[in-house]
Image (cartoon, grey):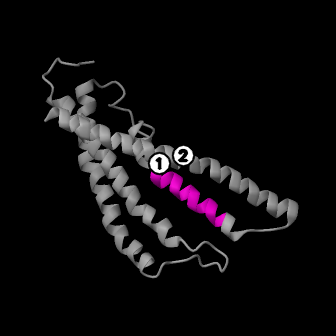
Amino acid sequence: MRNTAEQFAAAIDRAIAAIGRVAAWCCLYVVLAEFAVVVLRYAFGMGSIRLQESVLYAHAALFLLAAAWTLQVDGHVRVDIFYANAGRRTRAVIDLAGAIVLLLPVAIAVAVLSLPYVERSWAILERSREASGLPFVYLLKTLIPLFAFLLGAQGVAQAIRAALVLSEPRGQGAS
């Protein structure tokens, strides 16, 4: 049972890391596309709404798809009052409680509350309000429940790992 739980958490970690690495490329795109927008505007007097909106899409994708990966690698802001000097079991209790009491309920709420919003967008295949804008607003909005799912999945992986630490006999693996 323990081995299966570890494998499940590791599989979630691998999937989240892969998605995060792909999403990280959006950062390069944002920089290059925004540079192009500025050069086109100020050097050539041209503008491109599609290019500007693509920067917005890539920025949203970067943050919404890489958030779970950031959580996985402990890159989120954390108040380390208790956590920094805590032992392994105390950290596991904090991680487990945080995942169950805070992270998972928020992820579920975001997913549930965003679904009608996304469904309406898909029903009309929502497009940009700008005439020459991108016709994929529904795809952009789909990132919201996907963000919640990925963050929730990473929360499950962290809760599993914390529970495994707590299930160890006292004294084993202490640090």
Residue at the spot 47% in from the left edge and 48% down from the top edge? 66
Q: Which residue is mark 1?
A: 66
The amino acid pointed to by label 1 is Ala
Quarter of the image with the C terminus is: top left
**SS at badge 2:** helix
Structural distance between the alpha carbons of marks 1 and 2: 7 Å
76 lies above or below 50: above
Give the magenta-colored segment's residue range: 52-66
Q: Is residue 58 magenta?
A: yes
The answer to whether mark 1 and mark 2 are in CB contact below 8 A is yes
Q: 24 left or right of 78? A: right
Residue that badge 2 annotates: 24
Residue 154, how many percent across, how many down?
33, 45
The label on residue 159 is none
Task: In the rendered view, tell whether residue 36 sits above or below residue 160.
Answer: below
Q: Specify whether 33 is left or right of 117.
A: right
Point out the tag, 1 or 2, that comes first from the N-terminus: 2
Graded by Cα atoms within 10 Å as few (under 14), some (14 to 19) or many (20 or more), the crowding at tag 1 reads: many
